Image (cartoon, coloured by chain):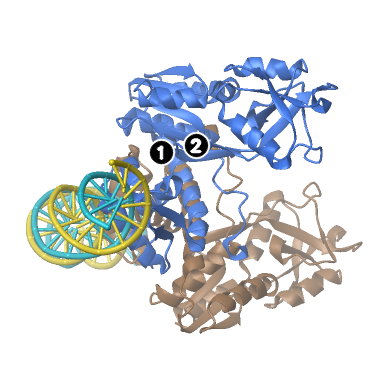
Chain colours: A brown, B blue, C yellow, D cyan
DNA sequence: CCCGTTCATCAAAATTCGTGATGGGGTTTC
DNA sequence: GAAACCCCATCACGAATTTTGATGAACGGG
């Protein structure tokens, strides 16, 4: 029987795909750059096809690389699930954890309560801020581990979830038909760029009508018909009206949710929390992916 | 970052779970018994819990072992998918492949045609027989690789698919209300045991009305209202009426479809075919499994 | 045009892993 | 009930694999 693939190699491969760099990926998986380089070399030899194009400064996936990537992700996701299940309940320590407040409201209670149940001795110190500020805080060493929305800022972490973005308005409100379109969004919110870019693409006029770093405040701006908002699926709230795509608003890009860790935040309690987050809210396991042959 | 699990260990673990023996599993994964034993030891140390109970002659999964098993299977299934995708189209040779004829009708054309497309130089010599005879043929060296229904015979292979079994009758036929119940089944068909056992359990009287080693013949016996049949999901045909569970027939055990290989049939072209089969008709990837926390 | 960064490569070192032999414990057989 | 048997765990050793740190070539920004 031909031996199965090496998950360690696949992890390195995915890390490279995520951050577009061997060197950076090596940091993430706690190896030297040359180790990662050789792992990929062996992986490519094993599969008989190049997986990454090294083109000067940029590293990109080949077609085969793409096909492998989604499968490798699924495997790693399951690996996280297992790690989460078996991770030691005796671990203790504290983690400074940052998360954007829009997710905090909806997802955190569920995730953290089950985490607290399995890891009663780990203190999770949660702080809620917009993604941009979380990244800044991370640079200043204020966090051990953050969840953030990546993409428009040019920071990339361990991608583990994507979410559809929706335009939302209040039921029966006027905002949607107002010209220029009044928008409500976070001050430094990276989604704003997504929305503004999308509007520019179709040449629709708009103005920023309301700005706040507090997600609840944005939500109420929308609900009171002050403005039109743009939210990820899991931040939608009852009372909001999702605007169908055929209206004249452009489709928004999906939001990419990733984890970033401080350089010391690997192993032990940090892995426990990261695995738990990925296992319980990751959606990149490709369960709805097509069979390989169909691609 | 804590290193991911070793798929090689998981493969050995699954092999043990499948056949209930370290020694036999070792044969399957082409290792010595001691190698497998140590792999499991390392795996258990890694996860911090015993996964298998060694109790005299029998090896069984612990609760943690069960939880791991389904995840490991999913990972291995994905591994097969990848192997299938990347497997070398230049492989050549011929494979004597056996499969029960009921599956042959429905599933083989799809699977073999896509296999032929990706591996034009491999000749697959297909023979259709009931599972029992395939196993006999395998012992006599007549096959390189077979797909069979395991369970009632005490042979176990690499389990890769389970199927719901159904009682079927013809539309508007009388057979179902005849006493004793007339049955149609394969001569040495292992499903017969399943059905007979199920009927005995509820004390329902029956007689074997029709027997043939040809699945088409059985199907026509059912369709012409000669008898009631019992078929796996994928062998159901238009014109058959599936008998709902609330009628007075007992629920049948699921059929377990497995692969068995001759001892020489590992690596190269054999892996290519086995991977392809598992990747394209395996259903044990646990996509409908509950999240681990819920178990 | 130089400097900094990135990735590939190499040989040596370290680690990991499998092997074959051995032993204990349980089961079957006579 | 003893002997033969089968199964799994363990051990020391040797083999294979992997990582490392150093080095070189290619590229791009300032």
> Percent from the top left, x then y, of residue C12?
7, 60
Q: Circle 1 sits on which residue?
A: B83
Q: Under tag 1, what secondary structure?
A: helix
* Vertical comparison of B108 with A145: above or below: above
Q: Which residue is mark 2?
A: B279
In this view, the residue in front, A183 or A289, is A289
Q: Quadrant of the C terminus of chain B?
A: bottom right
The dot on residue A138 is none
Q: Where B12 sits versus B136, above or below?
A: below
Q: Comparing marks 2 and 1, which lies closer to the viewer?
A: 2
- Residue B276 shown left or right of residue A147 in the figure: left
Residue drawn at the location 75% of the way across and 54% of the way down:
A204
**Circles 2, 1 touching at the beta carbon (< 8 Å):** yes
Front residue of A272 and A21: A272
In terms of sequence position, does the residue under pointer 2 or pointer 1 come before the other?
1
Chain ID at mark 2: B
Q: Is residue A222 left or right of residue B88?
A: right
Q: Residues within 10 Å of mark 1 (few under 14, many from 20)?
A: many
Q: How many marks?
A: 2
């Amino acid at each position: 029987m031909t031996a199965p693939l090496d998950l360690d190699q696949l992890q390195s491969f995915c890390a490279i795909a995520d951050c577009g760099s061997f060197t950076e990926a090596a940091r993430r998986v706690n190896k030297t750059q040359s180790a990662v380089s050789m792992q990929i070399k062996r992986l490519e030899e094993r599969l008989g096809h190049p997986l990454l194009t090294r083109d000067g400064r940029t590293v990109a996936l080949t077609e085969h690389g793409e096909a492998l990537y989604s499968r490798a992700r699924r495997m790693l996701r399951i690996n996280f699930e297992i790690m989460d299940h078996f991770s030691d309940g005796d671990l203790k320590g504290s983690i400074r954890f940052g998360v954007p407040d829009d997710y905090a409201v909806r997802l955190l209670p569920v995730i953290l309560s089950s985490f607290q149940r399995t890891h009663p001795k780990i203190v999770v110190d949660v702080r809620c801020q917009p993604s941009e500020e979380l990244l800044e805080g991370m640079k200043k060493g204020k966090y051990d581990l953050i969840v953030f929305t990546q993409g428009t800022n040019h920071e990339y972490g361990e991608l583990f979830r994507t979410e559809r973005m929706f335009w939302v308005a209040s039921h029966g409100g006027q905002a949607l038909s107002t010209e220029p379109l009044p928008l409500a969004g976070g001050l430094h919110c990276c989604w704003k760029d997504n929305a503004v870019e999308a509007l520019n693409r179709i040449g629709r006029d708009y103005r920023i009508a309301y700005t706040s770093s507090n997600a609840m405040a944005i939500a109420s701006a929308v609900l009171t018909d002050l403005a039109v908002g743009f939210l990820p699926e899991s931040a939608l709230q009852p009372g909001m009206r999702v605007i169908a795509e055929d209206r004249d608003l452009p489709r928004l890009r999906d939001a990419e949710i990733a984890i970033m860790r401080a350089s010391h935040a690997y192993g032990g309690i940090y892995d426990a929390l990261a695995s738990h987050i990925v296992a319980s809210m990751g959606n990149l396991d490709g369960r709805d992916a097509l069979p390989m042959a169909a691609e």
